[in-house]
Image (cartoon, grey):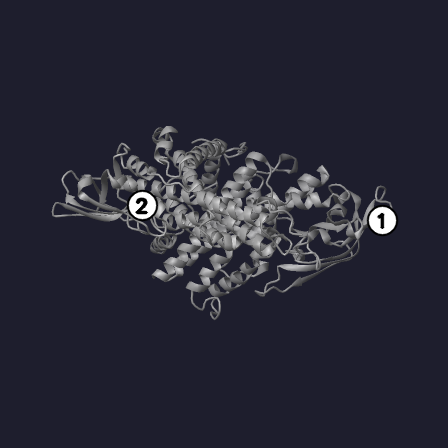
């Protein structure tokens, strides 16, 4: 592959990005047969996970997966935008589920920024190559939007936090995506007093085969089992698996936001264009359909424009803040609008059809209802926008 | 292209110049203010930035000028001049407003105040095969439009006369003029939308009910948050139209502008409640202005249907902008 390291850190490098995109598309075209899913949709979750890991391993062997990741974890360097382009290209071709694939973006950076360098160098390549899957243990039954209230407890083995060689974890997580497939978990635990909120949280990197972990997949509204409850019963974790500082877990959790709100969203946008493309192939050609499709396209375009600006801001300034709550509201609204358009134009497809194609649309339609719930509900985003962006002060 | 900081600075100074002139004299000649600031030179030099800066400021100050004529004229290859207006398409439409039959021009459309005295450039025919003809003031029958916003300065114009001098126009030039016109109006809507949101936020922080500012109530906060989401979406669509210029990105920016104006007017009017219902508060001027601007070069509804028809005809969904 000719393309290697480029310092794509500002808009002057856009031509480099275009060149990369061209090479990537050509390579994906050449490998079309090898990369394609083994059969037409609908795909079960098992099949989607297997497809993603297979695609990752092919991309890793060819060197694509390592682009945009630092060399100290086995990457090939370059702008993180290269990763974003790769995920978007896969989503646009329906080669990997963007919701699952982009989990890399919320997991690998955590290890790179907060794990011991030797640990990060050992495990990140396994995630990138599809050798391993990881999950994120954040939410709890009583801590959803209010994450800082989490209670899953970690206590130092022997009682002394500074001298302990291991920590013992007891508690429960929920909404843990892909927990039943995962080899590791980035886990947030309570290490301070119960009322210490965000000041008393510590992150750990936990092996999912450790004794005392029980995973119970949850059946979702669409019949799939992507999320799970995870129970921790006296689980022992070596102290050198702590991510970041003791009681510094909130910083670990917050550090994920820029990745989640930039790269993950751009991949989702690419996927939604792909799905709207499928819809216009199937929709009737009347004026009502034109209006519905046109309006969905308007929303996708505004979202894409916003997300593009966000990626460039991240590349130029290295940081993102509360303004990404705007992106979050736009992506959720556009996703639901896209599937509302599907439901309106493919009459009966979501509700009554038993064809294989209908199963995919039905499953995705139902899943899209979660877009305003996960990753901070639409209401929480609006609270953040009101307080942080509009300066309306506290609501208390 | 200048960078975002420079653009914001320029917009601020244009905004201040217009606001100063109007606070000294409510009926100040905004075109003269723009001329002093070097509008036409900047339009010739950096059309995208000039349009962004000037029309955002016009929207934010609720001022009306005839700068739209300059935008269209320069895109169509004419030297902008205070004595020449451009006949705009009918309300909510974007077809050339005139037709040529048996050597005569007949046209009906909208125009800026410039059409009250000056000559009128009339675009005729189908968008794929457009003609233009500069008609003398004497052939134009023009009256000021009151409508919902009599201060918008728009006129209803009917033109009838000899088609002598009509010339073919490159369809690309017409398409480019339409795109720049759409972007100009969309920037004006963006400026007005942000102004309405500022008014509503200021009111929410000052107005006390049940012993606290209404900005503390979540129902109020969420409406204002929604309005900001809409305003930011429009800014993004306008940035995309500037960075990836073309008829598609301009049409989408104009359609997003229409959607944004609707969301912002609805949310802000509700938050402003009683005071926003009076003519004593400036809100109503912005609301009415966006109603009028929504109809220039196609409303959101009409553009959405037009774009949707194209997606269905080609069975493709182009992404238009890349990272």
Q: CA distance from mark 2 to mark 1?
A: 78 Å
Q: In the depicted view, which residue is nearer to us: B7 or A349?
A: B7
Q: Residues within 10 Å of mark 1 (few under 14, many from 20)?
A: some
Q: Farthest residue toward the left?
A: B102
**Image quarter for residue A254?**
top right
Q: In the depicted view, which residue is nearer to us: B160 or A372?
A: B160
Q: Secondary structure at mark 1?
A: loop
Count of numbered circles on the image: 2
The answer to whether one can see residue B21 in this image is: yes
* Mark 2 vs mark 1: in front: 2
Residue at image point 59% right, 63% down? A224
Residue A296, compared with residue A66, is above or below; it is below
Residue B8, compared with residue A87, is above or below; it is above
- Give the residue at mark 2: B154
Residue A347 place in picture, x, y as percent:
42, 67
- Give the residue at mark 1: A157
Asked whether, in this view, residue B32 is left or right of residue A136, the answer is left
Q: Residues within 10 Å of mark 2 (few under 14, many from 20)?
A: many
Q: In the depicted view, which residue is nearer to us: A235 or A258?
A: A258
Residue at image point 39% right, 40% down? B63
**Image quarter for residue B29?**
top left
């Amino acid at each position: 592959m000719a393309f290697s390291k480029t310092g794509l850190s500002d808009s002057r490098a856009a031509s480099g990005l275009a060149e990369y995109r061209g090479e990537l598309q050509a390579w994906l075209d050449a490998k079309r047969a090898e990369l394609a899913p083994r059969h037409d949709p609908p795909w079960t979750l098992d099949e989607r996970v297997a497809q993603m890991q297979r695609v990752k391993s092919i991309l890793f062997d060819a060197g694509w997966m390592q682009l945009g990741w630092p060399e100290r974890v086995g990457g090939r360097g370059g702008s993180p935008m290269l990763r974003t382009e790769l995920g978007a290209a896969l989503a646009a071709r329906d080669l990997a589920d963007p919701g699952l694939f982009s989990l890399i973006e919320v997991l690998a950076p955590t290890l790179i920024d907060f794990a011991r360098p030797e640990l990060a160098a050992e495990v990140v390549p396994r995630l990138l190559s599809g050798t391993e899957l990881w999950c994120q243990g954040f939410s709890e039954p009583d801590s959803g939007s209010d994450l800082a209230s989490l209670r899953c407890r970690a206590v130092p083995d022997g009682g002394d936090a500074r001298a302990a060689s291991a920590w013992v974890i007891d508690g429960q997580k929920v909404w843990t995506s892909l927990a039943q497939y995962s080899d590791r978990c980035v886990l947030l635990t309570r290490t301070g007093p119960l009322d210490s909120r965000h000041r008393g949280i510590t992150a750990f990197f936990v092996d999912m085969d450790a004794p005392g972990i029980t995973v119970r997949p949850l059946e979702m509204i669409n019949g799939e089992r992507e999320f799970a409850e995870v129970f921790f019963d006296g689980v022992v974790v070596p102290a050198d698996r702590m991510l970041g500082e003791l009681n510094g877990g909130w910083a670990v959790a917050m550090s994920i936001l820029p990745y989640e709100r930039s790269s993950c969203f751009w991949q989702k946008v690419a996927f939604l264009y792909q799905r709207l493309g499928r819809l216009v192939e199937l929709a009737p050609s009347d004026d009502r359909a034109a209006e519905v499709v046109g309006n969905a396209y308007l929303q996708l375009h505004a979202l894409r424009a916003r997300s593009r600006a966000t990626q460039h801001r991240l590349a130029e300034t290295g940081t993102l803040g509360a303004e990404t709550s705007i992106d979050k509201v736009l992506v959720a609204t556009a996703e639901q609008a896209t599937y509302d358009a599907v439901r309106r134009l493919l009459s009966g497809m979501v509700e009554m059809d038993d064809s294989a194609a209908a199963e995919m649309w039905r499953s995705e339609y139902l899943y899209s209802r979660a877009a305003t719930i996960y990753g901070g509900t639409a209401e929480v985003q609006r609270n953040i926008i009101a307080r942080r962006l509009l300066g309306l002060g506290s609501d208390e | 292209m200048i960078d975002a900081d420079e653009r914001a600075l320029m917009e601020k100074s244009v905004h201040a110049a217009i606001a100063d002139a109007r606070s000294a004299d409510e009926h100040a000649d905004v075109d003269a203010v723009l001329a002093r600031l070097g509008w036409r030179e900047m339009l010739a030099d950096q059309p995208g930035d000039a349009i962004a800066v000037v029309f955002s400021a016009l929207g934010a100050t609720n001022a009306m000028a005839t700068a739209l004529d300059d935008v269209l004229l320069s895109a169509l290859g004419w030297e902008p001049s205070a004595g020449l207006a451009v006949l705009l398409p009918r309300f909510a439409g974007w077809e050339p407003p005139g037709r040529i039959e048996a050597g005569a021009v007949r046209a009906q459309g909208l125009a800026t105040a410039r059409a009250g005295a000056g000559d009128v450039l009339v675009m005729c025919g189908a968008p794929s095969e457009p003609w233009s003809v500069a008609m003398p003031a004497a052939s134009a029958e023009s009256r000021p439009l009151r409508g919902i916003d009599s201060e918008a300065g728009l006129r209803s114009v009917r033109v009838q006369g000899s088609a002598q001098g009509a010339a073919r126009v490159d369809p690309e030039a017409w398409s480019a003029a339409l795109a720049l016109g759409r972007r100009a109006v969309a920037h004006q809507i963006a400026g007005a939308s942000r102004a309405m949101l500022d008014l509503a936020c200021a009111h929410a922080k000052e107005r006390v009910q049940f012993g606290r500012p209404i900005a503390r109530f979540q129902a109020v906060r969420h409406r204002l948050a929604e309005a900001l989401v809409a305003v930011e979406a429009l800014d993004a669509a306008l940035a995309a139209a500037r960075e990836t210029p073309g008829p598609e990105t301009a049409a989408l920016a104009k359609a997003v502008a229409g959607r944004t104006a609707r969301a912002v007017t609805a949310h802000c009017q509700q938050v402003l409640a009683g005071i926003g219902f009076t003519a004593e508060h400036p809100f109503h001027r912005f609301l009415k202005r966006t109603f009028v601007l929504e109809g220039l070069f196609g409303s959101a509804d009409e553009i959405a249907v037009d774009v949707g028809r194209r997606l269905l005809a080609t069975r493709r969904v182009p992404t238009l902008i890349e990272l």
